[in-house]
Amino acid sequence: MLPADARVFALVPAAGSGTRMAAALPKQYLSLDGRTLAEHTVNRLLACARIERVMVAVAADDPWWSALPVARQRRVSTTIGGAERADSVLRGVQALADWARDDDWVLVHDMARPCLRVSDIHRLLDACGEQGAILASPVTDTVKQADAEGRISATLPRSCIWRALTPQLFPLGALREALQAALANGLQVTDEASAMEARGWQPVLVLGRADNIKVTVPEDLALAAFYLAQQEDA
């Protein structure tokens, strides 16, 4: 559990174009229940009082983010992201150095996860150990391993397989060093935990709710709208 006086910051990489959505603009600016997906996501983070600042890393040529009211919130800052997720996260971590120390904690969350519950953020903070923690979900389906020809080569034991979600929570300085090392070594990291794992860290897996979905393809928008409505009724 993080000490009560631990300082927590949030970082949202949002420089991608979301090509799988096949939309006219990046998916974070698509309408979802009357607001953009980006507004839903950042407002969920702002609803957690322990988060001192939310840093959003956007593309250099992004004309949409600055027009959103949430981008001008007192606790929100913006920086320019990079070509890949790891580049954007590293730049965001570096930008947070204006407010945060190396021993402060940074919570990295996908912009494409607008249904995050504040209760899940608190669960992550409460369960976090010295080597960090991530929200995750145990796999319930039978998992197959494929060979190069697309045929089943093995059935994997699902009891030890989890799907990585976000947020993912680590000390700012350690995360910066891990990302710098990964990029310098040409290591492909698709989430922050994999960069930390490459440094020998073993983050805690914290059970996250199933409605914390990532909007990736068009049909995910309708599912996200359904979950948002369910959360409002809860």
Image (spheres, rainbow, N blue to C red):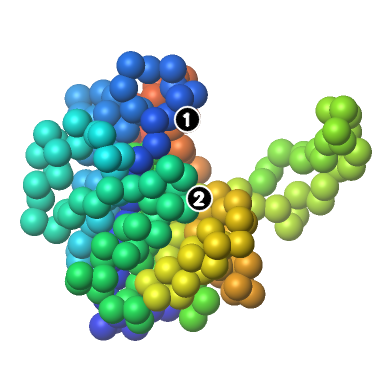
- Determine which residue is flagged by label 2: 165
Q: Tell me if 225 is positioned left or right of 75 in this view.
A: right
- Determine which residue is flagged by label 1: 216
Q: Earlier in the sequence, mark 2 or mark 1?
A: 2
| Amino acid on which the number 2 mark rests in the picture | Leu
Return the mark for residue 232. Answer: none
Q: Residue at x 20, y 62 (%)?
A: 53
Residue 102 in view (yes/no): yes
Q: Tell me if 30 is positioned left or right of 63 in this view.
A: right
Which image quarter holds the N terminus?
A: bottom left
Q: Quadrant of residue 66?
A: top left
Give the residue furthest to the right.
Answer: 153
Decide: is 75 above or below 219.
Answer: below
| Amino acid on which the number 1 mark rests in the picture | Thr
Q: CA distance from mark 2 to mark 1?
A: 13 Å
Residue 226 in view (yes/no): no
Q: Position of residue 176 (x, y in %)?
A: 42, 68
Q: Quadrant of residue 200?
A: bottom right
In front of the other: 162 or 202: 202
Q: Tell me if 162 is positioned left or right of 217 in this view.
A: right
Give the residue furthest to the front.
Answer: 184
